[in-house]
Amino acid sequence: MLKLENISLKIDGKTLFGALNLEVNAGQVTTVMGPSGCGKSSLLAFLCGTLSPIFQTSGKIWLNGKELNELSPHERKLGILFQDDLLFPHLSVGENLAFALSSKITRNERREKIEQALDEIELSGMSERDPASLSGGQRARVALMRTLMAQPEALLLDEPFSKLDQELRGRFRNLVFAHAEKNQLPTLLVTHDPADAEAAGGQIISL
């Protein structure tokens, strides 16, 4: 379970939001909605431990009973998807996926996990491809699998559907939510699009 307890964010003395409390159970999606500038993405950055120090924050973050506030970003076990896929342009598709894997596994295990991941998102045989040669929808799927292969304990979604066209948007949205449920990940989605919130099917909170 991902639990936020009395979370508030301020900047330059202005309160973006205050006293945010929510619980997201395993496999569920909770949506946080609001207009641009209300603090949605800043909330996710705070959860990840990457928020700029120019913000003033309060409240506690819990994941599966562990408080995250004092942990470094890589210790928090939070996976995040952004509007942009952020694939490394100098690495192949397979190398991008391998980036999420432990360095302790063997080369054969690494290759097997990469091929399994590509098969799961219907991109079999594309391990050696340059990410620039993929379509927007294909790149989004690779970004999703790279996030999941890092074995996060919760998933954060920072409007990852907003740059896809309508048809791809619906398909990718369904794919993300299906993987969140399959992997039993508590998932927090921030968006300004009511269609995203409706597709998520869970609790909706407005900032």
Image: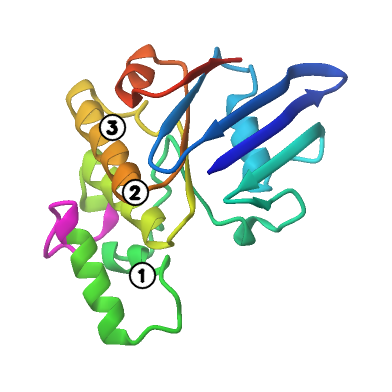
Q: Tag 2: Cα neighbours inside 10 Å, few (<14), some, or many (≥20)?
A: many
Residues marked 1 and 2 touching at CB (< 8 Å): no
Residues marked 1 and 3 touching at CB (< 8 Å): no
Q: Main secondary structure of the magenta part?
A: loop
Residue type at mark 2 is: Leu
* Residue 186 in the image: above or below residue 173: below
Colouring chosen for the image of the structure: rainbow
Specify which label sits upstream in the sequence, 3 or 2. Answer: 2
Q: CA distance from mark 1 to mark 3?
A: 24 Å
- In the image, what residue occupies the spot 64% across and 55% down? 73
Specify which label sits upstream in the sequence, 1 or 3. Answer: 1
Q: CA distance from mark 1 to mark 2?
A: 13 Å
Mark nearest the camera among 1 and 3 is 3
**What residue is disc 2 on?**
144
**What residue is disc 1 on?**
98
Q: Which numbered tag is attached to residue 173?
A: 3
Depth check: 104 or 153 in front? Answer: 153
* Residue 51 visible, this angle: no
Residue 61's quadrant in the figure?
top right
Q: Secondary structure at mark 1?
A: helix
Specify which label sits upstream in the sequence, 1 or 2. Answer: 1
Percent x, y of residue 13? 88, 19
